[in-house]
Amino acid sequence: MRLEQLDIHDVRSIRETRLEPGPSLNLLLGGNGAGKTSVLEALHLLAYGRSFRGRVRDGLIRTGAPALQIFARWSEQEGVRRHQVGLRHAGSEWQGRLDGGDVAQLSELCTALAAVTFEPGSHALLSGGGEPRRRLLDWGLFHVEPEFLPVWRRHARALKQRNALLKAGGANAALDAWDSELASAGEALDRYRRAYVEALEAKIERWASELIPELGSAQHTYLAGWRREELSLADALLVNRERDRQLGHTSAGPHRADLLLGFAARPARESLSRGQSKLAALALLLAQAEDFRARRGEWPLILLDDLASELDRGHRQALLTALVTSGAQVFITGTELDALELEPAWLATMFHVEHGVIRPA
Ligand SMILES: Nc1ncnc2c1ncn2[C@@H]1O[C@H](COP(=O)(O)OP(=O)(O)OP(=O)(O)O)[C@@H](O)[C@H]1O
Ligand SMILES: [Mg+2]
């Protein structure tokens, strides 16, 4: 995907600005508080329907403005296909447009535009709880498996209903019905995720060996969220039912799935440093971006917030070299150009961001 135009209105401190990026490396440079992260956040919002910095009502809309508006135009397959999306978000309600028509669901916008984002909070992908890793797997599946979203929705609905029944002390007959639906959707969800993790395996290893060779080869384990080798999800739900009634929620199932990433040189699951966690997170994100490209024939946009302050020189150069040769369109924010130490051959397009306005530099 090649972003050609991004218009941003009333996102954080940005009142109104436009970005017309170059085809490869795009650098957004400016001082602290200039609005650089907000530009990536606007793009991320179009691609995910959510911000990576909290909820919309936590200040995503510029103070005093009634709503934010974002518009993006991009091309695919060397310009053969063109798309455009627009989003207006007023805090509680939103309106979306895709290629000139209204959209009924935010997910339609998110299907159209794909981006992977690496930001200062991305270390949580490796060092925190399982939710961001489940989200990562589901994001990938959402884009590469057209049948995945209905299954995901069925599972989410059944889980919600079962939890509500557990909390309310519902009758066993009512629970039986939701258990059966949850088991059927949950087993399907698990099959998708396992197949996806298998497809990512070699790519994760390759990116990890490129970005963090000092940790040795990457090994991952996918956990289904229940003791899948021993019993079906339907049986697990039944076995846990009394305990779940006491807890007031479902204790085991695909909503507790996880993807554990380990490294040969860290056999005892010793915790990684913050920088190492970030590099491992990058390996995961880029493996996913590469899988997207293999299946869809396009790279997603790659958004890297505050790269220089996150990675040391050697790791940053390894990453940038790999990205420049990949052919992906990349957006990098930073406070100083010198800190990025770009190679002259890389042909980066530079922008200066100041007081929420983007200017070509
Ligand atoms: N709702 C809002 N309305 C107006 N301004 C806001 C709002 N939310 C945040 N801001 C301001 O937007 C500015 C831009 O923030 P942003 O995080 O994009 O800057 P940045 O260029 O990434 O800075 P840094 O280099 O420190 O990461 C900040 O000064 C922030 O205080
Ligand atoms: Mg920032």
Image: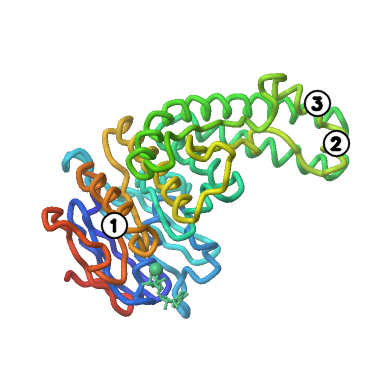
Earlier-in-chain disc, 1 versus 3 = 3
Q: In this view, does 314 lie above or below 77?
A: below
Mark 3 neighbour class, 10 Å CA radius: few under 14, some 14 to 19, many 20 or more: some
Secondary structure under tag 2 reads helix
- As drawn, the label of residue 331 is 1
Pinpoint residue 288: horizontal percent, then vertical percent.
39, 38
The residue drawn where x is 31% and y is 71% is 335
- As drawn, the label of residue 153 is none
The residue drawn where x is 39% and y is 58% is 87
The residue pinned by badge 2 equals: 243
Pinpoint residue 61: horizontal percent, then vertical percent.
46, 70
For the residues labelled 2 and 3, say whether their Cβ atoms are less than 8 Å apart: no
Pinpoint residue 103: horizontal percent, then vertical percent.
42, 48
Q: Look at label 3 and name its amino acid.
A: Leu
The residue pinned by badge 3 equals: 238
Q: Can residue 259 be seen in this view?
A: no
